[in-house]
Image (cartoon, helix red, strand yellow):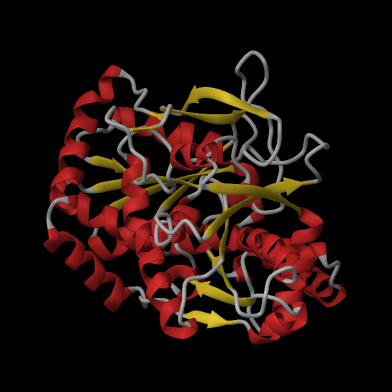
């Protein structure tokens, strides 16, 4: 990564814009992270934990039917859906859990959008014996009810956030407010490569395990590096995870796919770098491109995928975009549902709605490539968490009947 000599900055992006009351907490966190990163035994402990608890390395699957259908590049899918708790989020939270143990803290808090980071954090807290509180926008609580159920059953307290647009940005704000009041015993488990330094660097470091594995696996299976690597981008943690395996390979094109929602001209999307509606700003402790109005007020975002429904984006990815190292595209809600349907019926794999954005762009471009080229799609998570949203979008009659019967059973 192109981290400049100015600590915590990537080009002109990043930094740590924090209130004075958090300085000592961030000093402690920076020291703990720097010591862990310099200690090879820490990384080995992390890799061992992920291998014995979280099913790593996750497979790289050759999607032969989809490759045949598009008639171009060979499509490989990195299966983060098979990670414990069903997404790449476990990579980051288990690493931060090891840091929390070293810092001697007893409570963790987190924000979540799609709920997968919340489930992963609740799982980590249960394993390590930490108290756990998860902040989640009220709209996302309704969209991702199955994940709320599992967070609570794992022992976490889930707090619906009713301020603002009731989505991920508002959940992050509430988590910071909590942290300020309980710094001595609490660690904030940031879920993505955003926020004040050292969070972008820390989360990217733990997620780099995806790219390290994928690089070895594609050479082993295909005999050479891929031509293109695709990943969806909300905050950007899964993208930074897989991209880091190929950043130094100029011949490998990296493509981030954002939420195009109802279309880039509709005003109802969450595309920061693929569209024209974002501008530079500072919020939530860091500088990046935000969807905001001329007064600096964050605008409402929209995506069928709760995990991509966010106003900002990783400062690391913004720098890579500015350098031209990562190309950005957007996928609409309608395109996402079509790609999800095609992947299920051709490969028997159910990608999360977030991951399906990466599939959309890969499907658009696979046919223009040669059959001697390979592409990797990072499948950040599994789609069964999205069953209510997907069934509604497909207007599935048998699912509707099931819900009606359940409603009668509960007296609704």
Classify 123 as above or below 184.
Answer: below
**Which residue does the image show at 47% across and 71% down from the upper left?**
225
Quadrant housing residue 264:
top right
Residue at left offset 83%, top offset 70%: 400
Quarter occupied by the C terminus: bottom right
Relative to residue 236, is residue 391 drawn left or right?
A: right
Residue 411 appears in the figure:
no
The residue at 32%/56% (across/down) is 206
Q: Give the left or right position of residue 305, taking residue 154 as reference.
A: right
User: Looking at the image, which residue is at 67% across and 15% down?
Assistant: 294
Front-most of 137 and 232?
A: 232
Residue 78: x %, y % from top left: 51, 72
Picture coordinates of residue 354, whole percent (x, y)? 62, 58
Q: Nearer the viewer, residue 264 or 186?
A: 264
Horizontally, residue 12 falls left or right of residue 257, namely: left
x, y percent for residue 293: 67, 20
Q: Quadrant of residue 57?
A: bottom left
Taking depth in this image into account, of 330 and 80 the one nearest to the observer is 330
């Amino acid at each position: 990564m192109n981290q400049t000599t100015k600590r915590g900055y990537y080009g002109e992006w990043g930094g740590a814009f924090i209130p004075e009351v958090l300085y000592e907490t961030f000093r402690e966190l920076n020291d703990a992270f720097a010591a862990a990163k310099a200690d090879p035994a820490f990384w080995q402990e992390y890799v061992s934990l992920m291998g014995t608890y979280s099913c790593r390395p996750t497979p790289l699957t050759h999607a032969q039917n989809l490759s045949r259908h598009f008639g171009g590049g060979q499509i490989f899918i990195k299966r983060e859906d098979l990670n414990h708790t069903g997404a790449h989020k476990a990579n980051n939270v288990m690493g931060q859990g090891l840091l929390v143990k070293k810092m001697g803290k007893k409570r963790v808090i987190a924000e979540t959008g799609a709920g997968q980071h919340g489930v992963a954090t609740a799982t980590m807290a249960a394993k390590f014996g930490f108290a756990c509180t998860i902040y989640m926008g009220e709209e996302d609580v309704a969209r991702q009810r199955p994940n709320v159920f599992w967070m609570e059953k794992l022992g976490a307290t889930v707090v619906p956030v009713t301020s603002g647009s009731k989505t991920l940005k508002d959940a992050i704000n509430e988590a910071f407010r909590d942290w300020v009041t309980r710094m001595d015993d609490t660690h904030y488990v940031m879920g993505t490569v955003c926020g004040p330094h050292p969070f972008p660097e820390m989360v990217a470091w733990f997620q780099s395990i995806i790219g390290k594995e994928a690089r070895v696996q594609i050479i082993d299976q295909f005999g050479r590096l891929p031509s293109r690597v695709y990943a969806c981008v909300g905050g950007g943690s899964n993208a930074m995870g897989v991209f880091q395996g190929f950043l130094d390979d100029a011949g490998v094109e990296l493509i981030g796919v954002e939420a195009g929602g109802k279309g880039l001209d509709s005003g109802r999307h969450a595309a920061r770098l693929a569209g024209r509606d974002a501008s530079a700003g500072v919020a939530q402790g860091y500088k990046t491109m935000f969807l905001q109005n001329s007064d600096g007020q964050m605008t409402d975002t929209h995506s069928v995928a709760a995990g991509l429904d966010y106003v900002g984006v990783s400062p690391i990815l913004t720098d890579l975009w500015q350098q031209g190292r990562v190309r950005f595209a957007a996928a609409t809600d309608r395109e996402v549902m079509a790609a999800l349907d095609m992947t299920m019926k051709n490969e028997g794999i159910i990608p999360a709605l977030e991951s399906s954005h990466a599939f959309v762009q890969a499907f658009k471009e696979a046919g223009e490539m040669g059959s001697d080229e390979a592409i990797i799609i990072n499948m950040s998570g599994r789609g069964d968490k999205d069953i209510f949203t997907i069934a509604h979008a497909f207007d599935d009659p048998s699912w509707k009947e099931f819900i009606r019967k359940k409603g009668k059973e509960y007296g609704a």
